Amino acid sequence: MAPFLSKRDLRFQLFEVLDTAALPQRPRFADHSREVYEDVLNLAYNVADKYFASHARESDLNEPHVVDGKVQLLPAVGDAMRAFREAGFFSAHHDEELGGLQLPWVMTQAVQAHFQAANVGSSGYPFLTIGNANLQRVFASPQQQAKYMLPLVEGRWFGTMALSEPHAGSGLADITTTATPKDDGTFSISGSKMWISGGEHELAGNIVHLVLARIKGGAAGVKGISLFLVPRYRINDDGTPGESNNVVLAGLNHKMGYRGTTNTLLNFGEGGESVGELVGEAGQGLRQMFHMMNEARIGVGMGAVMLGYAGYLASLDYARERAQGRAASNKDPLSPAIAIIGHADVKRLLLRQKAFVEGGMALGLYASSLVDDLQTGPEEDRADTSLLLDLLTPIVKSWPSKYSQEALSDAIQVMGGAGYTRDYPVEMYYRDNRLNPIHEGTEGIQGNDLLGRKLTQAGGRGLEVLMSHIEADLQAAEGLDGLDEIRAALKTALEQNLSALKVILGKAAELGPDLFLANANSALEMLGHTVVGWMWLRQAAAAARALPEAKGDDANFYHGKLQAARFFAIYELPRIEFHAQLLASADATTHEMQEAWF
Ligand SMILES: Cc1cc2nc3c(=O)[nH]c(=O)nc-3n(C[C@H](O)[C@H](O)[C@H](O)COP(=O)(O)OP(=O)(O)OC[C@H]3O[C@@H](n4cnc5c(N)ncnc54)[C@H](O)[C@@H]3O)c2cc1C
């Protein structure tokens, strides 16, 4: 079996491209060191390998089902949760007082990457729990944190995010779940929540749902939406789970992939009252959820990267072993067939995967490092860092979701018929990843967010910060061996971006919102490819600096980085021109298409 993750590349990204080993200079991380980080990564690999990778296919073939009213999962999922808890990964990023290691977010994402690659279905339970606890840490009262959050941080109870409803997915402003105030300050919650991952199972003592609902009589639209803590079991005074809170499983959704994660339709307040507690102030529910979106969306992007990466490694392994055909120049039918990795077209498919997944991983980890900078970096930079992270978030979420799908298609192609069978994992990764452009805001919603909001936020400061960072890296890479072509392609891409954005943003008022946003997907494609091109410049520069001293495997590794950077510059960056032209022309083809014409 091919490894599910490249330890070498993860360390390259963390310690050679990013300066993660310097984080212990910041007071919050003072007890850390490169050795501590190595130990954490090794532990993550071992737990992921032994307890998660081992049942990935079994989970895919045996999706959750209900027996006597209870959701049944494979016993191996429970073992995996125990191992994750015992390794301390539910709390690793939290403060020491909460039992955490105060791990930086970039390291937390690097840890999570192991589990996403090894078994994305089982990793869903802890990651939802971690996201739920992180939100409570920012917005819940100290009493609520003691009651609902601590058991999540300790990994004893699990959490969900219950936003979507059967009729309201992208349009969350239209949710109808209601919260009726009770005399004791709590609320009675009633309504249906659709697609809730981890919504029902027997893996933990309780499940804490974070539910978006409207307080009865409140404002219409987004302003009327609040956030509530609604446990599966009501909580006794001593903190133990008590009687049922009437959150009823109406059914399980049967999915194409991610089959290990239970996905549910939940009815709140069916057959009795579902009692919930308001988090923070009324009317702030969507704002609170969006506060956590940067982290959640980086997590989705990284999940996509890791599926693509695992597929790349599997197809690479196969391509080295599979003998088929001969070089076009070899006319001797008696000579042995060569390994398919020797054919230029197979190398193209492998290089394309490498460029997408390693570029995506660089982007996900870079964005994670910005979360750390926002919390512990120099005070004077934080406003700019925040705008940069906001601008990058739709790209970090959607670019890997889309391009890992392309990479996984290439992985199947490399493997020919074998790739299309269940004997190998790539068809499973392909199905698993297909969720990523859909959940946590579809690709369409990310495009609208980028062009309609993030590019103009704070007078376009986020874009200025991004461009200044890219310019600085272009300058720093000047004169490095083998980078001229890459630098030139990225410079051209920057010019195309800036001129297209200037035109379309300048025409926004004249076009009106509908036509202005009609080609928002091209903004996502154009800026997404540019940002990943920048990530490749950063990787190529690190490789070029290290190469003169490198020998053996290390030298091969750095050569591979330079070649993949070159591939991205030559095969991918030129695609930007099409999107730049389409965007600047404010082409109205899709906007003007009439429903009756389909
Ligand atoms: C497996 C799975 C797990 C999930 N887990 C959770 C969870 O744990 N908690 C939770 O709350 N939700 C969860 N979801 C829900 C998920 O977030 C929604 O599916 C997603 O937001 C899209 O909503 P929808 O499915 O209703 O699609 P719709 O909103 O109906 O969208 C359909 C299509 O229309 C497009 N569209 C809609 N509005 C616009 C617009 N304004 N502009 C341009 N295009 C638009 C979309 O981009 C999409 O292509 C999950 C979904 C799945 C499939």
Image (cartoon, rainbow, N blue to C red):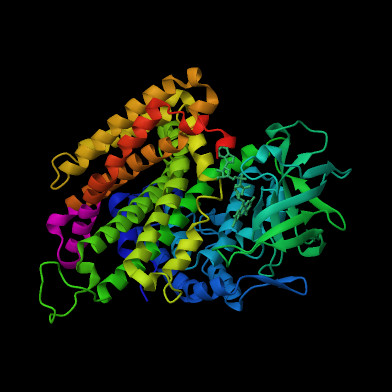
Q: Position of residue 40 (x, y in %)?
A: 42, 64
Quarter of the image with the C terminus is top right
Q: Is residue 433 left or right of residue 550?
A: right
The residue at 50%/62% (across/down) is 432
Furthest toward the top, the residue is 510
Q: Is residue 80 above or below residue 163?
A: below
The residue at 34%/69% (across/down) is 416
The answer to whether residue 72 is magenta is: no
Does the rendering let one see residue 399? yes
In-front residue for pair 407/75: 407
Q: Is residue 535 left or right of residue 396?
A: left
Q: Position of residue 592 (x, y in %)?
A: 51, 29
Picture quarter containing residue 174? top right
Q: Which residues are magenta?
A: 546-564
Quarter of the image with the N terminus is bottom left
The answer to whether residue 557 is magenta is: yes
Furthest toward the bottom, the residue is 334
